[in-house]
Image: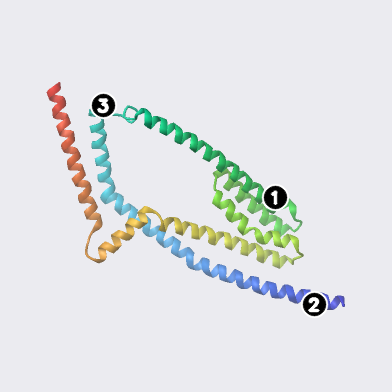
Amino acid sequence: MKTTQLTLHQELEADVMARRREELAALEAEIAQREPFLAQIQADLLQFERLYLGVVGSRYDDLAKIEQEIARLQGLTPEEDLSEEQEGASLGEDAVGCGQNRFHAEKLKRLYREVARKFHPDLVQCEIERHHRHQLMVEANHAYQSGAEDRLHELLVAGETLEVASQTPQSAEMIVLLRRISESRSLLSTIEANIDEILSSELFKLKQRVAVADTVGVNLLDELVSQVDRQIRKANNRLEHLQVLFQQLG
């Protein structure tokens, strides 16, 4: 009877391990596909950013300098131009901001405690699992100190397999397999978050608009340059007018 039960348990674990291996293979295949995609869009965006700053960015810098000189001649500074109502609004926003910061800090603390409660290395005896949990807590500490709430959530999700492993007897090979699955899930989650951040950025959206315009023979960057140049000319005219007024008054 015991031999039969042992055989059934071995067959069950072999079946579970086979499914886990398939899961790991699928995760690694997706990582192998998404990681180069992330690297490519990062490189493309960096190249476009350099082009944009070289073509348009310097002109915005010139426009900002002219407008600063206009403000100086008009006797305007950020402090003097701020009305009392605006000052009150700013103070109100600061108060709200402080409240949000306190709420964020409490939420971070709760998340960190949940990670520590579930996945602390001292909760298990297996050295392989202890090592992985130690790495998990190192990441959790870093996320907590940097205020990365999303990363703490990711660690909770990625560490769920550890909790399952600690509640049922597992072979060393199974624990290693679960650890690799957990790490792969975490890596894939980070890759997807970085991709989403790039694709939703204003710079990437501008890059897309430039590419679409180029397909119909329109150089959108040249048009942006023309727009900024017109603004620079208008600002220069205002500045010259003010300078003439100051000379007459002087």
Is residue 6 positioned above or below 213 on the image?
Answer: below
Q: Which residue ends up furthest to the left in the rendered image?
A: 248
Q: Is the C terminus in the top left, top right, bottom left or bottom right quadrant?
A: top left
Between the residue at mark 2 and the residue at mark 3, the CA separation in whole angstroms equals 88 Å
* 76 on left or right of 106: left
Residue with the mark numbered 2: 7
Q: Quadrant of residue 170?
A: bottom right
Q: Residues within 10 Å of mark 2 (few under 14, many from 20)?
A: few
- Could you say which is closer to the camera, residue 73 or residue 82? 82
Q: Is label 3 in a helix, a strand or a loop?
A: loop
- Identified by mark 1, the residue type is Arg
Between the residue at mark 1 and the residue at mark 2, the CA separation in whole angstroms equals 35 Å
- Using the image, tell me which numbered label, if any, was put on residue 117: 1
Give the residue at x 25% y 63%.
214
Q: Is the N terminus in the top left, top right, bottom left or bottom right quadrant?
A: bottom right
Give the residue at x 53% y 70%.
29
Between the residue at mark 3 and the residue at mark 1, the CA separation in whole angstroms equals 59 Å
Give the residue at x 54% y 60%.
189
Q: Quadrant of residue 222?
A: bottom left
- Using the image, tell me which numbered label, if any, was put on residue 75: 3
Q: Quadrant of residue 223?
A: bottom left
Of mark 2 and mark 3, the one earlier in the sequence is: 2
